[in-house]
Amino acid sequence: MDGGDGTVRLGALNLKAGRGLDLDPDVSVSSPVTRQKAAAAKQFIENHYKNYLQGLQERKERRRALQRRAEEAQISSEEQEEMMRNLERRETEYMRLQRRKIGIDDFEQLTVIGKGAFAEVRLCRAKSTGEIFAMKKLKKSEMLSRGQVEHVRSERNLLAEVDSRCIVKMFYSFQDSDFLYLIMEYLPGGDIMTLLMREDILSEDVARFYVAESILAIHSIHQHNYIHRDIKPDNLILDRNGHLKLSDFGLCKPLDGKYSTILLEDEDLTSMESTNEAEVQSRSERAPWLMPKEQLQQWKRNRRALAYSTVGTLDYMAPEVLLKKGYGMECDWWSLGAIMYEMLIGYPPFCSDDPRITCRKIINWRTCLKFPEEPKISAEAKDLICHLLCDVETRLGTRGVEELKVHPWFEGVQWEKLYEVEAAYKPTVNGDLDTQNFEKFPEIDIPPSAIPQVGPWRKMLTSKDTNFIGFTFKKSDIAKSLESSGTDRTASGPSKAPSLISLLD
């Protein structure tokens, strides 16, 4: 229908000469589902062109770097042209590999090695290469009903953005109609909680090594303006050589600035009676701050089961988080202080078989933070713990990681070489599929899916799909990609950006 001003009106759309497609201000004719799908399409297109432009920029940088290398070597123009043609062939092969869709059908699912409130982790084997990975599987409907969409998005973004030897690596992320999948490196050494349950306490030398590696791991995500918010022994994983990596970023949160503060938007952990010191003191007279031995043993027996519960363990959570005050990266350093205490003493500083009492103890840490006579620890270790389990203003790490590194307890630690030296503890690992350092879980038969797992973009999106637009990721490890395609490569570790130059000897 002609609008009289050269405008052809089609429903809520205006087609104007020379102006293309305009949206009518009156969009009331569109349903919420339509608007949701439009937003999803917009996100999909933005992600596509963002990835395309990023890949284009990386190819340009590789070409310039190869040209510089050729000029420095002063090789002939004919050889330079051959190097450029070789580069173009490798780039074409790499782009072809990157376009290949990855899905659950590409992996053989093996032993379950972890369960949480929202996820399951199991070993899996890539059918094409035989490589072993850890697969984290999350149910979409659970993520939506529990309000975990932003959390899983933050976890995926952090793993895709941060490339550090101190954190677990992610190689792929993808989804099907029901689940989200994260394919990560498998670290067969178990976690620090398993080590503590076996050893009860660690020597100061062993504890010093793992606290130091934890500092590097936490700092590696702080550098990218992420806060972990769930630092605990369960999330500190050991590789086959005993070196530590940080994992499970399901509660991580991006910050706008280094010392920005955020509020905990999750369930109210402080919905309890008064937490004044007088009440805590009164309770301490009836039940001493140090749990009786039989209660402590019960707490240890329940420790692993508590890790799988919806509430989780509160033992390592900072008071400013529990009180729902603004907080920032420094809350992760409190958690590390609680872990260090447990390594040296045998249990967390504020543990209780009642989560409400744990909360009260943490909030009233001035009264409840005490050290037993046995086991004895050094004055330097006690000083570091006290400067981590304290007010934000005086907490070490609040003003930068260097003030932690120079603490006297770390005297002699070679921070730059920590991941090159022999680890303080070497786990027993027998083969790539060995899971002896993880809990045993009952196996449940996996029913075959009737829905194609990999395929073209679905024409009709369900509401739970539109919430996870942009989740798919494939690690830009050019050397690994070319190796799996049959191209020779020299042995080298993964780099922060794909590099073809090392392949063009």
Image: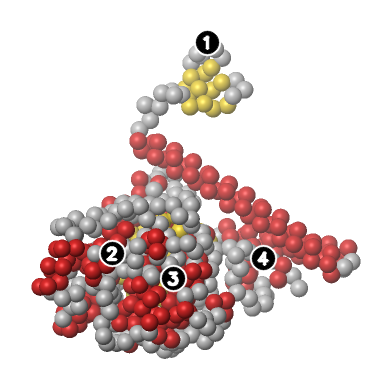
What amino acid does circle 3 point to? Leu
Q: Position of residue 53 (x, y in %)?
A: 62, 49
Q: Earlier in the sequence, mark 1 or mark 4?
A: 1
Residue drawn at 76 percent across, 63 percent down:
66
What amino acid does circle 2 point to? Ala
Q: Which residue is mark 4?
A: 499
Q: Give SS at disc 4.
A: loop
Q: Earlier in the sequence, mark 1 or mark 2?
A: 1
Asked whether the viewer can see residue 319, the reply is yes
Q: Give SS at disc 3.
A: strand
* Label 4 to label 2: alpha-carbon separation: 39 Å
Q: Give SS at disc 2.
A: loop
Q: Earlier in the sequence, mark 2 or mark 3?
A: 2
Task: Answer with the quarter of the image where residue 12 lies.
Answer: top left
What amino acid does circle 1 point to? Gly
* Label 1 to label 2: alpha-carbon separation: 61 Å
Q: Position of residue 328 (x, y in %)?
A: 40, 57
Q: Which residue is mark 2?
A: 117
- Using the image, tell me which numbered label, if any, was put on residue 422: none
Labelled pair 2, 3 in contact (Cβ < 8 Å) = no
Q: Which residue is mark 1?
A: 4
Task: Answer with the quarter of the image where residue 295 lies.
Answer: bottom left
Q: Which residue is mark 3?
A: 246
Q: Position of residue 91 (x, y in %)?
A: 68, 61
